[in-house]
Amino acid sequence: MAMDDVDCAEDKRAGAVSMVLGTDWVLPSSDRHRFFIVVKEELTQPEVLMKSRSSRPLFQLFALLLFALPVAALGGDDPPLPADCTEAMSTFEMNACAGAEFEKADVELNRVYKEAVASIPDMATGEQPFDKASWEEALRASQRAWIAFRDAECEDHVEMFWAGGSGRTVEIIGCKTEMTEQRTKDLKQRYEIE
């Protein structure tokens, strides 16, 4: 429905503009003015009425139902992951297993990165640009650039090969895992970390 089709009135006391479509649910929109859009369950030809700020309790009820009903419909629990992720069959299981692998790789990278930073004082000299502060800044800049590259490569470039298919997410997560494991290996080698 276009704004031209809606009659709006300004509530002088509340300083708000309100509009209502139906009478069942109230959804507030944000901006300079407050608009309330009420959506009727059987919406055929919406009737436009004026409504005051007293619709806020309806919004709270709607918000509660919006978040509670999907959880109740799903039974509240996610399906269990297979004990061995090589047996993952559904897209959900594959994505969850890939996500768990990425989390492990990311934790290991963070551990190795902290060890690399901690080893810099032993490797640095007292002269710039090889002093401790310069070396730490170089490593931080390198890590930030690497993260940006990894995310661009995996989230933007790899996605192009999947055209929105269901294998897209697992492929993106797999790409990030593979690149994270390689970065960990590189840092271990450079900084002689076990």
Image (spheres, rainbow, N blue to C red):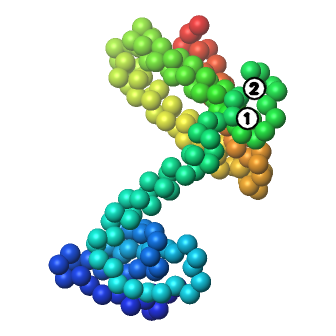
Give the image location of residue 99, x and y in percent. 65, 33
Residue at 29% x, 71% y is 54
Vertical position of residue 165 compared to residue 113: above or below? below
In contact (CB < 8 Å): disc 2 and disc 1: yes
Vertical position of residue 74 compared to residue 58: above or below? above
- Is residue 69 rendered to the left or right of residue 176? left
- CA separation in Å, label 2 and label 1: 7 Å
- Residue hosting label 2: 82
Quadrant location of the C terminus in the rendered image = top right
Foreground residue, 79 or 30? 79
Residue type highlighted by circle 2 = Pro
Quick one: label 1, few (<14), some, or many (20+) residues within 10 Å?
some
- Is residue 112 rendered to the left or right of residue 58? right
Residue at 37% x, 19% y is 131
Residue at 28% x, 72% y is 53
Secondary structure of residue under mark 1:
helix
- Is residue 85 rendered to the left or right of residue 21? right
Specify the label residue 93 is tagged with: 1
Residue type highlighted by circle 1 = Glu
Vertical position of residue 27 compared to residue 10: above or below? above
Foreground residue, 176 or 187? 176
